[in-house]
Amino acid sequence: MFPDANKGYTYDDCKATADWLLAQTDVRPTVGIVCGSGLGGLADMLKDQVIFNYKDIPNFPQSTVHGHAGRLVFGTLKGRPCVCMQGRFHLYEGYLIQKIALPMRIFKLLGVETVLLTNAAGGLNQDFKVGDVMIIKDHLNMPGFAGNNPLAGPNDERFGVRFPCMSDAYDRELQQMAMDIGQELGYGDFLKEGVYCLLGGPSFETVAESRMLHKLGVDAVGMSTVYEVIVARHCGMRVFALSLITNQVVMDYDSGEKANHEEVLHTAKLRAEQLERLVSTMVTRIEDNKNN
Ligand SMILES: O=P(O)(O)O[C@H]1O[C@H](CO)[C@@H](O)[C@H]1O
Ligand SMILES: Nc1nc2[nH]cnc2c(=O)[nH]1
């Protein structure tokens, strides 16, 4: 049923990539970070960087989207060894769904225990404003309803079980930690929580689609993150994710607003510094050996 689903993505392929990376750096990361659109500045905070362009890493996909630099950065954040994806992969770029989330398995084989993901998303919750940061408490895998799941295909038990639980996908302790740090930093006014919905993209939502998602209880919509979360949880890493609300989703036929990637990158730039401080403070407080 899944003839080629394992090609290039086997345990041995992932191990070969992880070993290739480990042979070229002394950094042994326990925290992995994924930067969303326009949020790659997070990687620049790492000290003693060892940088790999995606094109030089065996089995790695390439970034094709503006705002995703396409570099894997190893280094330390206040002494803690980290690895940071400066650019991620999306279904609309034409990649097989397994390839989009492949870096999560490589993270695992590098020794990563906790993954922090960021993304840019459109706000559906009417209480959200552009520039708000939404801590993701749950997701809707909309393409998943049609069978698009990165775990489809043969299961390798060395990564995880055939039927992984997802009701605890987003670590509650890490959500609370983010809230607490946000309060300490004075970000209370723009720190929210909610449900993220993945759509395939690359077209933005129609008014009817946005209204439907709103009725379903979705707080923010985007084109990433969920596949990474599923694969990270499958192989037992702790997950925290947040969305920067870069634009309000258009839900009114009379609205003159038009969703566009330039606005997404512009908002990301305005909020980047605070987002970086929030995530980097979290990194320093995360305890090792707590994965489940
Ligand atoms: O989710 P990230 O990678 O942050 O990017 C978001 O921004 C792009 C649209 O502007 C889409 O790729 C959407 O998913
Ligand atoms: N699908 C979707 N993705 C986004 N990424 C950033 N903004 C948006 C949006 O409004 N819709």
Image: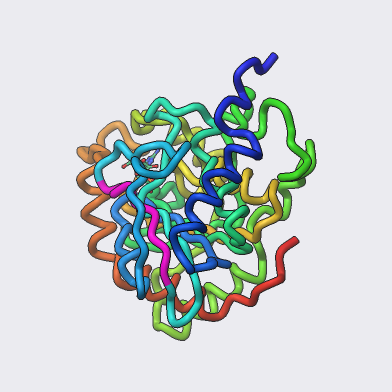
Q: Position of residue 238 (x, y in %)?
A: 65, 61
Near-viewer residue (214 or 276): 276
Which quadrant of the structure image shows residue 259? top left
Residue 74 part of the magenta segment: yes
Q: Position of residue 98 (x, y in %)?
A: 56, 32
Quarter that holds the C terminus: bottom right
Tell me if residue 147 comes above or below residue 259 in the rendering: above
Q: Residue furthest bottom?
A: 184
Near-viewer residue (215 or 135): 135
The residue lying at 54 percent from left, 67 percent from top is 28
Q: Position of residue 221 (x, y in %)?
A: 45, 43
The residue lying at 32 percent from left, 58 percent from top is 40
Which quadrant of the structure image shows residue 5? top right
Is residue 188 visible in this depiction of the protein? no
Tell me if residue 225 comes above or below residue 194 in the rendering: above
- Left or right of residue 250, residue 149 in this image: right
Q: Which residues are magenta?
A: 67-75
- Left or right of residue 288, residue 155 in this image: right
Q: Position of residue 263 (x, y in %)?
A: 22, 48
Which quadrant of the structure image shows residue 205? top left
Near-viewer residue (173 or 85): 85
The residue lying at 50 percent from left, 27 percent from top is 96
Tell me if residue 3 comes above or below residue 242 in the rendering: above
